[in-house]
Structures are given as structure tokens and as C-alpha cells.
Image (spheres, coloured by chain):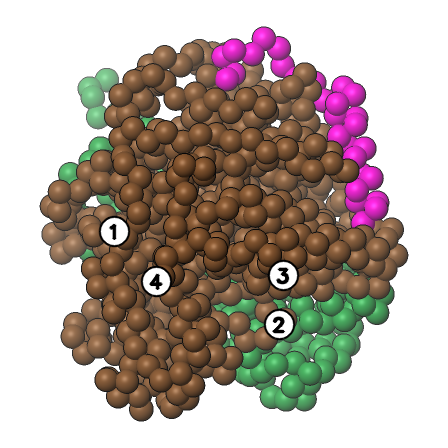
Chain colours: A green, B brown
Amino acid sequence: MNFTLRVWRQNGPVSPGEFEVHEVADIDPDASFLEMLDVLNERLISGGSEPVAFDSDCREGICGACSLTIDGVPHGPGQATTCQVFMREFDDGSTISIEPFRNSAFPVLRDLVVDRSAFDRIIEAGGFISVGSGPKPEPNATPIHPATQQSAMDASICIGCGACVAACPNGAAMLFTGAKVTHLNVLPQGEPERHHRARAMVRQMDDEGFGGCTNTGECQQVCPQKISIKVIGELNREYRLAILEKLRRRRGPLRPQ
Amino acid sequence: MTLEDGIPDAPLEETWRTWLDGHKLVGPRQRSEYHVIVVGTGLAGASAAATLAGLGYKVESFCYQDSARRAHSIAAQGGINATKDYANEGDSVQRLFVDTMKGGDFRAREGNVWRLAELSTNIIDQAVAQGVPFNREYGGHLATRSFGGVLVERTFYCRGQTGQQLLLGAYQALQKEVAAGHATVNTRHEMLDVVVEDGRARGIIVRDLVSGEISRHAADAVVLATGGYCNVYYLSTNAKGCNVTATWRAHKRGAGFANPCFTQIHPTCIPQSGEYQSKLTLMSESLRNDGRVWVPREPGDDRAPADVPEAERYYYLEERYPRYGNLVPRDVASRAAKIVCDEGHGVGTTGRAVYMDFLDAIREVGHEAIEGRYGNLFELYERITGESPWEVPMRIYPAPHYSMGGLWVDYRLETTIPGLFAIGEANFSDHGANRLGASAMMQCLADGYFIVPHTVTDYLSRLSDHPDSNTTAFDEAEKQVRDKLDRLLSVGGVTPAPVFHRELGNVMLDRCGITRDGEGLRDAIGKVAAIREEFWRDVRVTASGGELNQALEYAGRVADFLELAELMCRDALERDESCGCHLREEHQSEEGEPRRDDKRFAHASVWQYQGPDADHSHAREGLEFEEIEPVARSYR
């Protein structure tokens, strides 16, 4: 198959960027999108030009590294990670435009590579259960209903790719944050820190410059893990509960003064 | 080089307790004075970094990915073993120990394997406390399933994404320590050398992959958790970025490399579709619980699978191994697939594939049950191949997956360089000549959460001074790193690095893959040397070192693979026996089963670097079997 690619090139976070046009010929329909870019890069290097920088690692849809906006859609067609998009999904001879994930909280490092460390900082704010390493109680002493476990799992499968942010007209990170809060807050292990977690993660999300949710729903349309927008409802609920808890705590300790 | 295993003199079941009771401690108030570097943020690295930071040491962690959450442990699908015996099958530490020793074809160290089996249950407890959502039974208790090479259900799982969930547990624990100020994570940094001073590891040299800046990092101890080297084959199930660079550079600084030829070829991967493809996607071994593996009985039969009547199907695993059937260990399943394809039974366009068929299982237990077990794997398969396993059998073929070999370590997981530790897939310690399914994550987390934090403590307690990065050893290491990068950038050739990588992979798969023989290995050594020479004459790396330059990163990794590959072939040649994954065609039974030679080869081969112009020296760590009698491995 043959394609015309419009590829975003940019030297660094503050340099201006532009689209560069490349013709790629003789691509196997069963090649993945990233393998097609590998082929392009090899040809560019052979010809003495600089290859296009892009992130990828596991190439099986789970690490969350790959992050291309293809024809305006984060990860492109098929609601899967960029590495799981195949050239047979495009028309022979078509023109494809390739950009990085766009959001001001994800600065471009080079070409199609962006900095998503804001996500790590949101996790740092409270996306964990505070246990150290060492002997722990027998897990079966606390039975967990399989439906609860499955709900936790439906949220915890988030791969942290950032497509939800790139798709959102407000540049919100609510699907990402909501998924982690849901995962940890539905489980009994997450209960003691649930209020602090919701508040701290939302605060960090705001500090990073992400926008707010207006229920447009584009995030769940592009999420390769098909995480439901319901986790945003969960996040809002947890956040309100946390605020109420904070008000209650203002009364001070329950013991007589 | 001394190869003392350092296992305390005690009955096997008491060795770890004995070691723990005897090791020296560092007081809580002193810990923040000690600096520990952990390279790699997979299951082993993240769990070690989080635990060491939790103890109060100052931890600096490094990874080449853009976040600590992305290391390739995340792709482990099937599960993690633990001897909880929830299924009431009489499972025990002893049984997991025996299965692992036997699975590794008696080429692992008894003491390490026993400790691994012993710690397996703690890992499950730890992970559940962190909120890892393991699958549950209706009563709310943890669910288990079985895996290749064993006859009990001891594998815990989170759907088909167990590695992801366990890694997120460790990653979150690490980010918690970052927030607490005990740890820093340097993402997009690649370690390019270990600094050794007065015979001890004193720090590392790293390259910032965004700015290209080279920097020095001194530490009291260095832990390498940098994974395996199966990308030496070009084709593999590893992530694109997986590489041998950290362990290889440590090796060139004096760390012994053990059993480099022990690489596992995983039997159930989606076959390659074209030469541009290096990444092969693995289909979890757990699928073999319900998937029946077959090929047409008549060689060259190219009918669609549905048109091949039952009587004309060759269920070769079930026929050849009636006791274990489709659940034989990985090395056995991979060889069997190669043999039937060599005999012309293979299917698909290339003839290098076999069927894994779920239609019987769907009929027996229903669509819903199968969907619950493997739904996401079926989707993954359909996405990649465009074929639905609900309607046609999957096509699978073996692919390089895991390296049992790695840096030699003693019982404390310390390499032959004092102060340099290696954990997880980066070391050689626990899996012998073949790893059983669901054991990799177990080893990584045992090493990271429960072993290396104590052994590093013991090491630190004996130190009398802290390192300084303004020394000649650091100057010299930094200069070598800069020189090597400059050399890569100034070859002035015309061929991109992936071309050499493909050539190398072809030679290695052909000569040092599922089967090996003396003549082929000697031939491969020459070919690898020739590719290496050509690489340094003709590689083209564009742009400069002072910027984000993925072509430069890739070329550096290929350069190291080109050196490692030769050592793998030498090791495979020296090991003139068959064991586990290492099948020398000269040493097999009439049925094609490997024949071990315990008299000559009951040892780990440890190779020592002797400089660029000399051959490696070779030493042996003898393996003694006190608890278990080495027997011929049989899964029939």
C-alpha cells in the first residue's frame, strides 16, 4: 500500500513546529501503524535525514507509551492504542496526518514525543495505598465480593496513555484521575485514605493545568482500555464526600474538651 | 573471580531465616545518609526502590521509559505463582521448589529456589494490601488457576493483565516514596556505565535521553533491575526498548555473566507477518488450559481448519505427553511445534504456525466462561490478525521471550562486583535452564520486596565511607561513555542500525534458538563477528548526541547485542549437553527429548570479560543437589 503522511516535526518545547510531507510506498497491509513509521524512519536514515521521533515500547497495547494523534483522533481508528492500529484500516493511497497528543500540560519534547509526567505527579498526590513492604495479613481474611473486584479492575486497567486528555475539548484529566480514584476507593484496602486521596489528586490535577469535565464524553470514545465515563461520576461523588468529611472534621475531635 | 554462593550452613528450609537472623543492620537514623541507585522500574526495580526508600535510604531510580509505570513487566499476562494451597491440593513450598528445580532441568541453585518458593505467599499478601485486584471466587476469596509444567492450581491472576496490576502496585508504592521525599525517579534516562572504584561499585553514568546530557551519579550501592536480553534475536516478545546495555556494560566492568545461552522461546506467540516486524505478541500460556494445540495429520494439508475432520487432526502435545497434554513446560511445547512444522505439518501462509483451538472448550463450558477467562486475549488476537478465535483456531508459533541467563549473583543477589546487585530477569539465579510460567513475576517481586532490601542493608552496614563522583574512576568512565557515543555518531556509513539488528537476529534464531549444534554455533560466532565489524564500518546514525536522538539510542543497544551474541554462542558451544531450553542436537533421545550430562555440566557457566582483544575467561559454579535428586525430566 502507498500513503502520503503529513507528520508533525518540532525540535523542542519552545521551537515552532510544522507538518512535513512524506510519501511511503510498499507498505504491507498487515503492518502496524508504528511499523509503518519504523519503515519510514529506516528510509529517512538511509537517505541521511533525521528520523521522526515518537514514543512506543511494548507494542502490544499495554504499556501506554505510544501516543499519536492520527487524522485528528488520539490513537486513530478503532479505539485501540496507536501500536494496535494496522495499515489495512486505511485506504490505499490516502493521506494521513500524524500529530502528538495535544495538551498544554503535555509539552512536546520533540516531533511526536510529549512529556506526560503530570500523570506521575497526580499519582504521587494520592494514587496509592500507604503500606510498606513486609509481612501482611492473610488476604482471604477480608473477603471481597467478586463484583467489587471487577469494578476495581474495570478502572485499574488504565494504561496512563493520556488519550483521554488529548481528546477532551477542555483538556481534562478526569478520566485518568477518576479511574485511579475508583480503583482504590471501591476496595476495602483503600478506605482509610479515600477522602484525602480524592481531594489531593483533584488538587494536583488542577495545579498541572488540566481543565474540568463538562461531560462531553470524548475521553471514553478514545480510551483504548474502554474505561467508562462513569469513573468521572465516581470521582465527583468521592470528591464531594471528601469535602463533607473535611467540614465534619472542622468540628474537632469527638472527645469532650 | 570467586564464585561463593554464600548460602548459610543450615538445613535448606532454614537457610533464609538463618541468613536474615545473622545479617547486619543499619539504624533508622543512619539510613538517610546512604544513597542507593536502582536502575530499571519493572517489577523488580520498582519494588526494590519502593522498599529501600520505605526503609529510609535515599533512593535514586532510573528508567529509559517516560514513566516508571511502563516497564515491560506490564505485559506479563497470565499470573503469579504462590503456594497458598487454597485449592486444597496438598501444595507446599516443597512442591513449588521441586516444580521449579525440575522445570529448570536441574541447572538452578537449590538455596535460591527454596527461598523463592518460601517467599511466594508473602508476595500475594503484599500485593493484595496494595490494592492489586486479583480475581475472586463467588465467596470473595482469591481465585487460582493452573499453568504449564505443574499439576496444581497455584497461579493468582487479574484477568489477563496480572503483570500490569502488579507493576502498578509497585509503581504506586514508588511514587508514594517520591512524594515523601525518599526517592527520585529519573525517567528518560539510560544507564551507560557502572563506575567501579577500589573493586566496588560506586555509581553510574547516565545519559538524559531528552537533552543528551551525560551525568554522574555516585551511590553506596547500585542495584540493576534492567531485565532480559531476548531482543538480541530481533524477533521477540520483549518491548522495543528492552536491551542488554546496563548488564553488558556492568559485565565489561568485571561482573561475571552466567549461562548467557539459556534463553526461553515461548510457544504461544502470534506469528510474524513481515520482516519489518520485530515485536511478536505473546498469547498467555494460560490459554493452554483450554486451548487444544493441533496441526493437520497429513503434511502439506492446506484445507481450512474447519474442513479438517477430527480424525485427521494431530493433537501432538496430547498424544506425545498424555499426562501433561497441552500444559507441558514451554521449552517442550516450543520444540514440539518446531518439529511438527519442520515435518511439514505447519499451517498458515508461511507454514511456521500451529493451531490453538478453543472450539471444544467453548462447547464444553460455554461462551461466557471462556470470555471471562480470556476475553481480552481473544480481542488482542483478533485486533492483530483480523481473525476471531471464537470462529477459527488461533495460529501460534514460538518466539524468544525470556532470558534465564544474566549477571551471576550469589545468595545475596550481589554480582562479582561488590556493591553491585542484580535482581529480576537481569540476574541468572532461579530458573536454571528453563523458567516455568507465572514464575518471572514471582522472582522479580521476591527479589525486590523481600530479598535485596535486606542484602543491600547488610552490605551498607559494612561500609566505612561514602562515594564521591569527583574521582578519576568517574572521569574515566564518563570519558569512555562519551567516546563510545562519538564513535557511533562518526562512523559515517549509510546503513541504519535496524538492518544489522535483523541480520544478527536471523543468525541467532537459526543457530542459537530452539535447537543448537556445534557446527552451527561455530559458524554463528564467525557470522556475528562479521556483522559486528560491518556495523562499525557502515552504520549511519543521524543528528547529534546533544538532543533527543532515538536512532543513537537504538544503535548503542545494537552494538551491545552484537557483543553479547558472540558470548551466547560460545556458552552454547561450551555446554556440550542438552538441558531445558538448551537443546544440542547432538544430545537428544530418539523422541527428541534433551539429554543432560550431570557429570560434566551440573554447573553454572560464568564468563568474565578480559578486554576487547581477548577471549572471555570461563569459570564454573558447581551445583550441589541435597534436597532433590536430579532425574530425567519427563512430562509424558
Query: Would residue B559 appear left or right of B632 to someone viewing this image?
Result: right
Q: Which residue is mark 1?
A: B150
Check contact, mark 1 vs mark 3: CB within 8 A: no
Quick one: label 4 or label 3, which is nearer the N terminus?
Answer: 3
Classify mark 4: helix, strand or loop: loop
Quick one: label 2 or label 1, which is nearer the N terminus?
Answer: 1
Quick one: label 1 or label 4, which is nearer the N terminus?
Answer: 1
Single out the mark in the foreground, 1 or 3.
Answer: 3
Asked if badges 2 and 4 are on one and the same chain, I answer yes
Query: Would residue A37 appear left or right of B629 to someone viewing this image?
Result: right
Quick one: label 2 or label 3, which is nearer the N terminus?
Answer: 2
Q: Which residue is mark 3?
A: B507
Q: Chain of mark 1?
A: B
Q: Is residue B483 above or below residue B633?
A: above
Q: What is the magenta range?
A: B459-488
**Could you say which disc has been placed on residue B173 in the image?**
none
**Could you say which disc has been placed on residue B275 in the image?**
2
Q: Chain of mark 2?
A: B
Classify mark 2: helix, strand or loop: loop
Q: Amino acid at mark 2?
A: Glu
Closer to the camera, B542 or A100? B542
Task: Where is residue B242? Give x, y as percent.
Answer: 57, 51
